[in-house]
Amino acid sequence: MNSTIIWIIIGMGLVTYIPRMLPLVIFRGKELPPFFEGILKNVPFAILGALIFPNILMIQHSIWFGITGAAAAFILAALGANVIIVVVGSIAVLSLYSIFF
């Protein structure tokens, strides 16, 4: 491997590690106000929605496939399920949908 590629890989590793490490170091032992904790708890759902929602409208096979998956995800999220449960539950619903329809 070229040494330039190795340095690029090391640089990319640092660029992704530093933003993840800094909040842990800066906020160690400090408690955030409840308002900010509430916002941070909803960030994964907001990001998941922003990544998936445009693709729901672009499904070429059947728009109902996308709407069914989105409805399953919204219901699970509204019930307070973990992000992983929301994703796996939506996949399970769409698997059943593809079998029966």
Image (cartoon, rainbow, N blue to C red):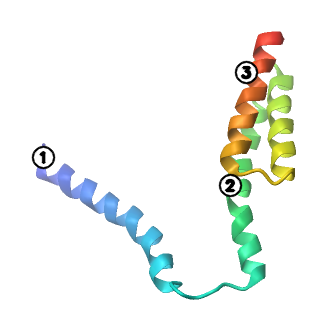
Q: Quadrant of residue 46?
A: bottom right
In the drawing, what numbered circle is on residue 95? 3
Q: Nearer the viewer, mark 3 or mark 1?
A: 3
Mark 2 or mark 3: which comes first in sequence?
2
Residue 32: image location, x then y, percent? 67, 84
- The span from disc 1 to disc 2 (Cα, nearest Å) is 36 Å
Label 1 close to label 2 by CB (< 8 Å):
no
**As displayed, is residue 39 above or below residue 82?**
below
- The span from disc 3 to disc 1 (Cα, nearest Å) is 45 Å
**As displayed, is residue 47 above or below residue 60?**
below
Judged left or right of residue 48, residue 97 is: right
- Going by the numbered disc 1, the residue's amino acid type is Asn
15, 38: nearer the viewer:
38
Residue occupying image coordinates x 33% and y 65% = 14
90, 79: nearer the viewer:
79
Residue occupying image coordinates x 71% and y 75% = 37
Q: Residues within 10 Å of mark 2 (few under 14, many from 20)?
A: few
Residue 59: image location, x then y, percent? 75, 26
Q: Secondary structure at mark 3?
A: helix
Label 2 close to label 3 by CB (< 8 Å):
no
Q: Secondary structure at mark 2?
A: helix
**As displayed, is residue 31 above or below residue 57?**
below
43, 85: nearer the viewer:
85
Mark 1 or mark 2: which comes first in sequence?
1
Quadrant that contains the N terminus: top left
Residue occupying image coordinates x 25% and y 59% = 10
Q: Secondary structure at mark 1?
A: loop
Residue at numbered disc 2: 47
- Going by the numbered disc 2, the residue's amino acid type is Ile
Whether residue 11 is visible, yes or no, is yes
Q: Nearer the viewer, mark 2 or mark 3?
A: 3
Residue at numbered disc 1: 2
